[in-house]
Image: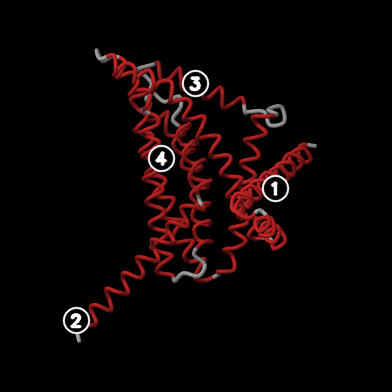
């Protein structure tokens, strides 16, 4: 009898773990856009920091990211248990915000005069570079504001990840949601900041290899030095594209008429149905982002007047 109960318990645990694994994979796929942007943004946050302080800054932001998720995951579970109807509106807001962020980056690149970069940011960057050259400056104190800003940005991105992940788990039990969200939070934080630490040290690895006597090591070092900035550029572009795809996909699935159009186009495309639907999501995401951005710009102008 006891043996049979134990087997039933193990079977239940295996079923839960299987559900958690499936939900975690689905959530990871849905949050790809936020992760790409998160990775590029956090790698850029370390720019201007002295080389021997880069990993310390990354670690400080990673700890803040864990704290953010310790707040967000329980809050999301409470919303799911008490007011499940809020998940869809929050998901739509998160999707719209992703599209808006993507559109803002595109307009910054294509038409910078419409969204000029803040000159204060450039001045602050120059100040950090001067401080790095001064051995008398307390770099830890100087970096505190930078770290706090990065943690605030992480809070927004983490909230998007949690909400999007929760939207995938609407039919799951509370226990499965809790386990899957916890797994996503841990995996994403360790994965993102582990990669950020590796990325920001690529140039240092390159310099180290250049000083080796081996010609092969020197060639690899030159390759890393050339590759590092290209990787940052690729991550930025890929992250922006993924934001339109993921954000647009959320909006498409949340608006009945858009969802029907996507399904119709997918059916008409035959074997290319999946690709067509993905492109449709991206176009919807781009249009939605540009419309929201236009509204924000207009609103700011009206407020100034």
Depth-wise, is mark 4 or mark 3 nearer the camera? Answer: 4
Mark 1 or 3, nearer chain start: 3
Q: Is residue 62 above or below residue 81?
A: above
Left or right: 262 as drawn, with respect to 206: right
Is residue 6 positioned above or below 179 on the image? below
**Alpha carbon distance from label 2 to label 1:** 58 Å
Farthest residue toward the front?
271
Question: Residue 58 falls in which quadrant of the image?
Answer: top left
**Quick check: marks 2 and 3 in contact, CB under 8 Å?**
no
Q: The C terminus lies in which quarter of the figure? A: top right
Residue with the mark numbered 1 = 288
Q: Are marks 2 and 1 in contact (CB under 8 Å)?
A: no
Comparing labels 1 and 3, the label whose residue is closer to the camera: 1
Label 3 environment density (alpha carbons within 10 Å; few <14, some 14–19, many ≥20):
few
Q: Looking at the image, which residue is at 65% across and 40% down?
A: 103
**Quick one: label 4, few (<14), some, or many (20+) residues within 10 Å?**
many
The earlier-in-sequence mark between 4 and 1 is 4
Residue named by callout 3: 127
Upstream in the sequence, badge 2 or badge 1? 2
Residue 16 % position (x, y): 36, 69
Mark 2: few/some/many CA within 10 Å (<14, 14-19, 20+): few
40 or 83: nearer the viewer:
40
> The N terminus appears in which quarter of the rendering?
bottom left
For disc 2, the marked residue is 3
Taking the spot 57% from the left edge, 63% from the top edge, the residue there is: 87
In primary-sequence order, the first of circles 2 and 4 is 2
């Amino acid at each position: 009898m006891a043996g049979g109960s134990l087997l039933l318990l193990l079977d239940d645990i295996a079923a839960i773990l299987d559900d958690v694994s499936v939900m975690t994979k689905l959530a990871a796929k849905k949050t790809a856009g936020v992760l790409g942007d998160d990775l590029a943004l956090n790698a850029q946050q370390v720019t201007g920091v002295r080389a021997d302080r880069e990993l310390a800054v990354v670690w400080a932001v990673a700890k803040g990211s864990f704290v953010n998720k310790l707040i967000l995951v329980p809050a999301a579970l409470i919303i799911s248990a008490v007011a499940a109807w809020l998940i869809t509106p929050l998901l739509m807001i998160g999707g719209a915000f992703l599209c808006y962020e993507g559109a803002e980056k595109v307009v910054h690149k294509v038409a910078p005069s419409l969204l000029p970069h803040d000159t204060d940011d450039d001045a602050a960057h120059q100040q950090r570079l001067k401080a790095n050259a001064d051995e008398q400056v307390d770099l830890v104190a100087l970096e505190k504001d930078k770290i706090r800003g990065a943690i605030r940005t992480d809070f927004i991105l983490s909230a998007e990840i949690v909400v999007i992940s929760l939207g995938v788990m609407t039919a799951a039990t509370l226990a499965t949601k809790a386990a899957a969200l916890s797994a996503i939070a841990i995996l994403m934080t360790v994965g993102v900041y582990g990669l950020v630490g590796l990325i920001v040290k690529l140039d240092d690895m390159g310099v180290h290899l250049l000083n080796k006597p081996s010609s092969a090591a020197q060639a690899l070092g030159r390759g890393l030095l050339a590759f590092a900035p290209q990787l940052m550029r690729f991550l930025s572009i890929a992250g922006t594209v993924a934001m339109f795809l993921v954000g647009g996909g959320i909006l498409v699935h949340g608006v009945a008429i858009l969802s029907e159009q996507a399904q119709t186009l997918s059916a008409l495309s035959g074997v290319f149905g999946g690709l067509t639907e993905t492109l449709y999501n991206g176009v919807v995401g781009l249009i939605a982002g540009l419309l929201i951005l236009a509204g924000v710009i207009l609103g700011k102008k009206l407020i100034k007047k």
